[in-house]
Amino acid sequence: MKTEKQIRAVVFDFDGTLATLNINFPEMRKAVLDLIESYEIPVDALSDLFVLEMVDAAETLISLKCPGEGNDFVQKANSLITTIEIEAAKKGKLIYGTRAMLSNLKSRNIKTGVVTRNCQSAVTCVFPDINMYCDAVVTREATRKVKPHPEHLLTVLKLLDVTPEYASMVGDHPMDIKIGNDVGSFTIGVLSGYSTSNELLQAGADIIIHTAANIINVLP
Ligand SMILES: [Mg+2]
């Protein structure tokens, strides 16, 4: 049973888990869909995807239709996404108790990491001293595949030098729970972000806590 293992590392999602950013995802999706349509690509088949995956899929379609324009599209799309993320980060803040909780884990020799689809600039805008509190921070620029692909979490765990069964994944979104379960880690849902307790439990969360700061009370 994974719950009986001594936890050696805790990996956190960022937005909604360690920080409140309030990224305007509908605005972001609309901006990217409008950009895709400007290449005369039909967007119906793309509109159910998460926005980063939408960019990947559209790049393939645009490269087929207009050879050589895929890179240009990706740069424009990334610029739109990053602009919205940084705008949100400027108004964002760390969730109460985040630094104290991370220090507490460090004092117990539990390594800490962050796995986020957000960009590095937005993360450091909200949490400039994050590297003093976290042993590994893997933003989307630092991984080939972003979560919910398991490679993103495995990249963090490799940097932490901890195998998945000795790690706990903490997040506010069902994809955080899925990625944790997919690699075989203990999964903890938090209610400080976008999901309800039921949604996180349905995604397979082992436990639910109110905010990430409460983790210090539930780890052995
Ligand atoms: Mg989140």
Image (cartoon, helix red, strand yellow):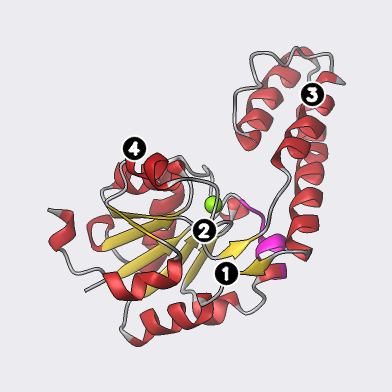
Residue beneath label 2, please?
192
Q: Is residue 189 visible?
A: yes
Under tag 2, what secondary structure? loop
Which tag, 4 or 3, sits closer to the chain's start? 3
Between 190 and 85, the residue placed more toward the observer is 190
- In 3D space, how far apart are the residues under numbered discs 4 and 3 (Cα atoms)? 34 Å
- In 3D space, how far apart are the residues under numbered discs 4 and 2 (Cα atoms)? 17 Å
Q: Residue at x 44, y 84 (%)?
A: 103
Type of secondary structure dominating the magenta stretch:
helix
- In which quadrant of the rendered view does residue 92 lie? bottom right
Amino acid at the residue labelled 3: Ile
- In 3D space, how far apart are the residues under numbered discs 1 and 3 (Cα atoms)? 35 Å
Which tag, 2 or 3, sits closer to the chain's start? 3
Residue beneath label 1, please?
95
Residue beneath label 3, please?
36
Residue beneath label 4, please?
202
Q: Quadrant of the C terminus?
A: bottom left
Q: Are dots 1 and 2 in contact, CB under 8 Å? A: yes
Which tag, 1 or 2, sits closer to the chain's start? 1
Q: Residue at x 73, y 21 (%)?
A: 63
How far across and down, in percent of the image, does residue 145 sit?
Answer: 51, 42
Q: Which residues are magenta?
A: 118-125
Amino acid at the residue labelled 2: Ser
Which tag, 1 or 3, sits closer to the chain's start? 3
Under tag 1, what secondary structure? loop
Q: Is residue 8 visible?
A: no
Mark 2 surroundings within 10 Å by alpha-carbon count, few (fewer than 14), some (14 through 19), many (20 or more) = many
